[in-house]
Amino acid sequence: MQMVNSQIKKQLSGSSLIRQMFEKGIELKKIHGEENVYDFSLGNPDLPPPESVGQSLYHIAEEAAKPFSLGYMPNAGYPEVRAKLAEHLSREQGVALEAADCIMTCGAAGGLNVVFHTILEEGDEVITPSPYFVEYDSYVANHGGRLVRAESVDFTFDLDLDNFAAAINEKTRAVILNSPHNPTGKIYSAAEYTRLAELIEAAEKKYSRPIFVIADEPYRFLNFEGVEIPSVFKFFRHSIVGGSYSKSLSLAGERIGYLAINPALSAEEKKELSGGLILSNRTLGFVNAPAVAQKILLDCLDATVDLEIYRKRRNAMAKILDDANIKYSMPAGAFYFFAQSPVADDRIFVDALLKERILAVPGGAFGRAGYIRLAFCVDEKTILAAAGGMKRAAAECSK
């Protein structure tokens, strides 16, 4: 007898390689000791939250003795948090947002599921550049849609507009843009957005339906070169920005994120879209974003962990890859390298690294075989200690 539905059964059979490698690391650490295993599999920030987060928690604990201090609030979040977020995002995105344009969510992942539940009909398609964050497949399928890959330019991972043009059709309902990008660290340019906007505007007219552009931005603060990160609001009328504080405040386990809709939409459009998103936030069972995490944001919205620590780690990872003659495109943002495998079958290289107690994820898990992903959100000493094993594994696979 089958205990789960067919979709879940299929997803279980292809369970996330990221999580598989992470769990393999736990096993190896029990055998060899944590300091002798070099785990670059999971984007799980190891830095403590900024000091202001601890101070905020202390104040929240004092307030917790009051009635309803941690009870339900409106499904879109505390009004004062939404107002403060609107001010913050207005500066960040370069547009004038109001509190009503913002909805607090259970992380960026919860926010994406809320969007797809709200806008997708059965059989609708959502396009994303490939390689891509592997969970997008499930987020779209959860709500009756199908994820369509538009292959990006090999090695540089620029948007390939010809591939986007070929992917757009009458079923296209949305596009996901993740910048800075997981797994490549790519930051998309204003020129790329300009050309993509022309394609989408033409398709909207042709098919007489909005095509939503959804910016997934949990890594926006991790911008190592200080380049412009264009706001989708300025290029795409039907756009939504989603993000979280998992990385910037090291609050991954708190599951706090947001959605913001383009203020350029008409009042009627905004009312319908925001109403649908708020309803979905409730009926999907999220009800509201975590109360404690929202209260933390009131005190810490403009704080971040130290970017320089991640920059030093990026440079350390680049050095050990250079020493091992492994080719890569230097990530401009996020905390991942998407490096070329020295052998065509990336799983062979991942297995060779595993023998050296180095954990990486094969590029095929992200829709681009021939690469590996390395997360450098670990201590710099761990990165440097993996140098010998990285060089040996690469040499073995290059024979």
Image (cartoon, rainbow, N blue to C red):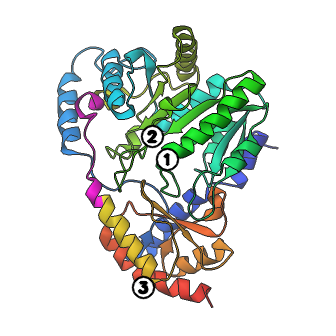
Task: Please say if the residues under marks 2 and 1 sit with CB atoms less than 8 Å apart.
Answer: yes
Instruction: Please identify, in this view, whether the residue under mark 2 or under mark 3 is nearer the observer.
Output: 2
Identify the secondary structure beneath mark 1: loop
What crowding class fits label 3: few (fewer than 14 Cα within 10 Å), some (14-19), or many (20 or more)? Answer: few
Q: Where does the magenta region start and end?
A: 296-309
Q: 41 above or below 230?
A: below
The amino acid beneath tag 2 is: Pro
Residue 4 visible: no
Residue 161: percent from left, percent from top: 66, 47
Task: Please say if the residues under marks 2 and 3 sit with CB atoms less than 8 Å apart.
Answer: no
Q: Magenta stretch containing residue 389, yes or no?
A: no
Question: Residue drawn 56% across and 16% down?
Answer: 279
Residue 388 - label: 3
Question: Residue drawn 56% across and 34% down?
Answer: 214
Q: CA distance from mark 2 to mark 1?
A: 7 Å
The amino acid beneath tag 3 is: Gly
Q: Which residue is mark 2?
A: 230
Residue 209 - label: none
Q: Quadrant where the C terminus lies?
A: bottom right
Q: 123 above or below 4?
A: above
